[in-house]
Structure formats: structure tokens, C-alpha cells
Image: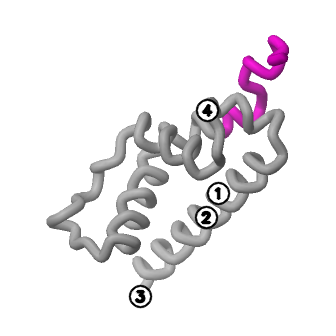
Amino acid sequence: MTTERQRMGGRQARRAAMLCNDARFRLYLDARRRKRNRMTREQLPDGTHSAEDAADFIRGACGIGSRAALDHNAQAWQMFVRIVEDYNRWQRRQHQNRGQ
């Protein structure tokens, strides 16, 4: 039985929502998809992923139907942490590449 607390999003769900609304995270999703599918920028331009696409990605990768589950499902939370770590690593590489 799902409790009211489980249906509501807590801190981690809000964090995921903020990430989905972050244009840089959506650029990361563009770059990630290009790399995985061996696509060019012409085939998949920057700005392709929307906030809803980002939410779909997080829910799918974490195996959940709602971001609210991140606050109540340890496995989903662990996957979300991995997504954030991968994104942060990508951001650092982007910053380093600009400095060269």
C-alpha cells in the first residue's frame, strides 16, 4: 500500500526535478546520446532534450514511475547518484576542454 508520504516527493525528488530543469544537464543528455549512438551534432543538435525528456531519462534509468520514489527506494536513489556523478564528471571535462 502506498502511503501519502511515498506519493509526495521529498528532498531527492526535488533535487531530480531541479536537475531536469537545468539546461546544462539536458546538454549532457544530448552529448551522452550522441556518444552512445555514434551520432553527430547535425544528427542530434544541442538543445534536443527537454525537461520532460530528462525526467523520462531519470525515471527510466532508475526504474521508477515517479521521481518521488527516489526518496523511498534505495536502488533508485543509488542509480540517481550515479547519474549525478556521471554528469558532474562530464561537466569537469567540459570545463577542462574550454581551458585548453
Colouring convention used in this rendered image of the protein? one colour
Q: What stretch is highlighted in magenta?
A: 1-15
Whether residue 67 is situated above or below residue 57 in the rendered picture: above
Choose mark 3 or mark 2, whichever is in front.
2
On the image, the x and y values in percent for residue 45 come to 22, 59
In contact (CB < 8 Å): disc 1 and disc 2: yes
Q: Name the residue under label 3.
A: 100
**Residue 41 located within the stretch drawn in magenta:** no
Nearest to N terminus: mark 1 or mark 4? 4
Q: Name the residue under label 2.
A: 88
Q: Mark 4 points at which residue?
A: 65
Amino acid carrying mark 3 in the image:
Gln
Total marks placed: 4
Furthest toward the left, the residue is: 42
Question: Residue, x 22% and y 67% (percent of image)?
Answer: 41
Q: Mark 1 points at which residue?
A: 84
Which class describes the residues within 10 Å of circle 4: few (<14), some (14-19), or many (20+)?
Answer: few
Numbered disc 3: secondary structure: loop
Which class describes the residues within 10 Å of circle 1: few (<14), some (14-19), or many (20+)?
Answer: some
Amino acid carrying mark 2 in the image:
Asn
Q: How far apart are marks 1 and 2 (CA)?
A: 6 Å
Q: How far apart are marks 4 and 3 (CA)?
A: 42 Å
